[in-house]
Image (tube, rainbow, N blue to C red):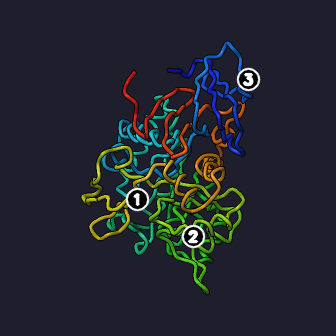
Amino acid sequence: MARPGDNFAIQVQTLFDGESFMQNCGVLIEDGRIIDVLPSAELPENFDIQLMTEGILAPGFVDLQVNGGGGVMLNEVPTQTTVNTMAAAHRTRGTTAMTPTVISDTREVQQAAIEAVVKARAAGHPGILGVHIEGPFFDRDKRGAHRAGFIRRPMAEDIEWLCSLNGLPVIITLAPEHALPGQIRQLTQAGLHVCAGHTNASYEQINTAITEGLQGFTHLFNAMSPLSSRAPGTVGAALDNEDTWVGVIADGHHIHPASIRIAHRAKAADKLFLVTDAMATVGSDDTAFEIHGTRIEAQEGRLVNAQGVLAGSAIGMIDAVRIANTEVGLPLAECLRMASLIPATFLSLDNELGRIASGYRADLVHFDNDFNVHNTWVCGAHRAHRHNQESPPG
């Protein structure tokens, strides 16, 4: 097994480098970084060669909305161990970098979740990029499965608290119509990535928020004011604006395939990326879990509460790539970009992640034609998986 300090090469039949497919080539890795991509015949003899006879090698997936995995939820047990468990579970689905997501809760729980992420990063976990704070500053009518008792407007002290997190990459999802004038600008000037979600904002309100620095939209189409003939709403503003980013949950349940295709055409300038919105069941044998005292169950591939409301998803990123390709009908190259380079670019990490090129971090995923993940590398450290499950130790 390779270690981050090892020099080795990965030889593959098919490689996607972040832009296009290449055949019969190899990736040279030294000290956790990619140093070159060469034809197989030109691989140096002094490098250990890991031969992948079949499948595709691609940049490791980057997931910016991960609520849980491996049987745990960040809100329920906001510890460093939970963060590590989530990362390990999603690695079996090809995700090599992620922003653990804490949903609407008390300030104490959200602060504990943030501290857990900080500790994981301080301990040297390269796959933890930052934190996504989803709520509680939402519209009550668009809260979805978020607990009603937590939903509120952002106060001055909330903005001050969020701005104090500027040493950590942070995504904050909120309803712009409930923010006071200037609050979104404060957040963006402090370095936070502000997204609209769980919002009933009008087209005009969203455009005002964009002038203050609103950058993106969380799980487009879901829990937001829709596009209609005389009221374009949040969805219309998201599709109309060329500069903003949108994440979509391609799980076959949250969004109709045609809606994803429409969004892809509207956001053709590399602004549409895949997220999982994954919950505790991913990477686990569990089919149910609890959050805030509410039982969430898997039913025909969906996760729902007792009222039948969708509560996150049961997919990993390799599933989102598969569905976007085989059910939505997007080219595989585009699906892979939407799972790696585009979310990395949203976080301004596209000089580190999302490409197989000289100087980039050796974060890689190897999967077969049936979209089963077989191998991953994080900063060059290799882990083998068998049909989305961890291989036995050794």
First in sequence: mark 3 vs mark 1: 3
* Eye-nearest disc, 3 or 2: 3
Cβ atoms at labels 1 and 2 below 8 Å apart: no
Q: Percent from the top left, x then y, of residue 225?
A: 52, 76
Q: Identify which residue is drawn at 60% across, 61% down.
A: 329
Answer with the quarter of the image where residue 246 lies: bottom right
Cβ atoms at labels 3 and 2 below 8 Å apart: no
Circle 2 residue: 259
Q: Is residue 257 above or below residue 358?
A: below
Q: Secondary structure at mark 1?
A: loop
Quadrant where the C terminus sits is top left
Q: Percent from the top left, x then y, of residue 374?
A: 49, 35
Circle 1 residue: 312
First in sequence: mark 1 vs mark 2: 2
Residue 270 in sight = yes
What is the spatial separation of the Cα atoms under label 3 and label 2, in whole angstroms?
44 Å
Q: Percent from the top left, x then y, of residue 303?
A: 35, 60
Q: Secondary structure at mark 2?
A: helix
Q: Which label was assigned to residue 41?
A: 3
Q: Which label was assigned to residue 30?
A: none
Q: Secondary structure at mark 3?
A: helix
First in sequence: mark 3 vs mark 2: 3
* Identity, as a three-letter code, of the amino acid under mark 1: Gly
* Identity, as a three-letter code, of the amino acid under mark 3: Ala
Q: Is residue 349 left or right of residue 118?
A: right
State the residue in front, 80 or 189: 80
Q: Residues within 10 Å of mark 3 (few under 14, many from 20)?
A: few
